[in-house]
Image: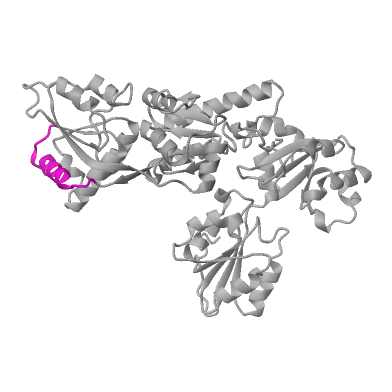
Amino acid sequence: MPTNSPPPFVEHAGGFVAFVGAGPGDENLLTLRGAALLGKADAVVLDRAAFGALLRHARPDVEVIDVTDDDPAPLGAVKAAKGGRRVVRLCPGDPMFFSSISEEVAACAKGEVDFEIVPGVPPATAVLAYAGIPAAASGPEFRVVDAGLVDDWSVHAATAGTLVIYNAGGDTVSVGKALVAAGRPDTTPVAVTGAGTTTEQTTVASTLGRLGPDLKHAVIDEPSLMVVGEAVTLRDSLSWFETKPLFGWRVLVPRTKEQSARLVEQLRSYGAVPEEVPTISVEPPRTPQQMDRAIKGLVTGRYEWVVFTSGNAVKAVREKFEEYGLDARAFAGLKVAAVGEATARALVEFGVRPDLVPTGQQSSEGLLAEWPPYDSMLDPINRVLLPRADIATEALVAGLTELGWECDDVTAYRTVRAAPPPAPIREAIKGGGFDAVLFTSSSTVRNLVGIAGKPHNVTVIAAIGPQTVRTAEEFGLRVDVMADRPSASALAAALAEYGAKQRQAAVAAGETPRRPSQTRRGARRRAK
């Protein structure tokens, strides 16, 4: 059997269109083939509002053709493919599964444009999996129908298994009544899921007889999917997506994008919707001569130790090294300390393994607690280099001096307050639109309040350590969560634990779990 995959694109004189299934909504469910085609495309035809996130797989210079109801996709795809251009047309779900791409394919054939159809993950199976409903657990049959194409529901009412209904939309209750009228018992379990596989997913589980009352106060976003059958009863034990500890929580991350990449991914793993709002801009020092002398001294043996108190300090030194044509080998013979795990990781990525990382409190105090006093018999040099921010505190320098060390406290970078975020973000911060805010330093507290105002009192405030807690309280904020150790990862984990406890308490009380933003006055309620 052949084992080689098809090439990313086959060159054709008349152009080429790949109809790629974009999946059910979760951008991570795109197939490998679809991602490869996007990476080679000259143009992408898509509904940007629905699938814009998938453009991260495309080249920066790709042409994006945003289709609307008034701008039919066939013309856009065919036109873009003329002259040998490589085009990807992103289609909802699977292109051949209740899709209208047949017209677009016909347009390609008529225009003598070659094409390929790439299957995608269909909502019929993916949404059920994300809702915790096993597709074929209640019988020998798994039937999928389009409500818009059904005139007689008696044919489907007798399905001996799971019935999945597309495009019921506002007629969901009417479809349920039609199934009962056609002979399906009104006690038959049914579930309706909106915005499936996304962090806006909402599922209402009911029976055909109670579907109307149970949906009355629910907010089900489109596209929605209706599932009928005994498999729905397994949802209580198999639900995994909507029960994530921070599912659907809109979490403000007031850091620079470079600093927050790992934190954002961790929050997403808990089901949160992180939103980065830079509060600090990291810039080079106004006078670079001090750093130039420090790098020269580092290479010529002036220092016994180099202490890094942040990833930004590592980045600043690394950039200076690259400027002078140096690499990690210049640290040979030097002892290197990192204030915590995140800074240590940045050093390891640079090619430097730190000799000292606090095992207890990961802070300047924790570093000083484990720092060896200067011993003239063991240490030939008593000088320490500290490349730091311009606003760094004096505690570390004072502590090292008390231990007998001489310190060169060098400004490696400046921290400048960022510009205010857009008006909708500011309004969400002050109006309770965010469920939580993560403060990773005292400066993020001061700067966020300075550029956007104080978070609403329903917003959960999470702070990285005691000093950040004190700063938040000085601004009148109630701190709900503090990390057990001063790292961004520990802070995110602590927030997830808080969210899990809130969810468990609501369930134990027989209530529907609600996000903090849903408790403010005027917030719409979601049934799940």
Q: Is residue 358 above or below residue 218?
A: above
Please state if 452 lies on the left or on the right of 205 as rendered: left
At x 45%, y 43%, the residue is 277
Q: Position of residue 410 (x, y in %)?
A: 18, 38
Q: In which quarter of the image is the C terminus?
A: top right
Q: Nearer the viewer, residue 265 or 448?
A: 448
Q: Position of residue 461 (x, y in %)?
A: 49, 29
Q: Which of 363 and 321 is in front in this view?
A: 363
What colouring style does the render use? one colour
Q: Position of residue 217 (x, y in %)?
A: 77, 37
At x 19%, y 52%, the residue is 323
Q: Where is residue 167 in the image (x, y as percent from the top left)?
A: 76, 53
Q: Tell me if residue 291 is in the magenta stretch.
A: yes
At x 61%, y 60%, the residue is 47
Image quadrant in which you'd find residue 406:
top left
Q: Tell me if residue 189 is in the magenta stretch.
A: no
State which region is magenta. 285-304
Image quadrant in which you'd find residue 357:
top left
Q: Magenta: predominant secondary structure element?
A: helix
Report the number of numbered marks.
0
Please state if 8 lies on the left or on the right of 345 as rendered: right
Q: Quadrant of the N terminus?
A: bottom right
Q: In this view, does 130 lie above or below 119?
A: above
Please state if 55 lies on the left or on the right of 165 as rendered: left
| Residue 5 in view, yes or no | no
Image quadrant in which you'd find residue 247:
top right
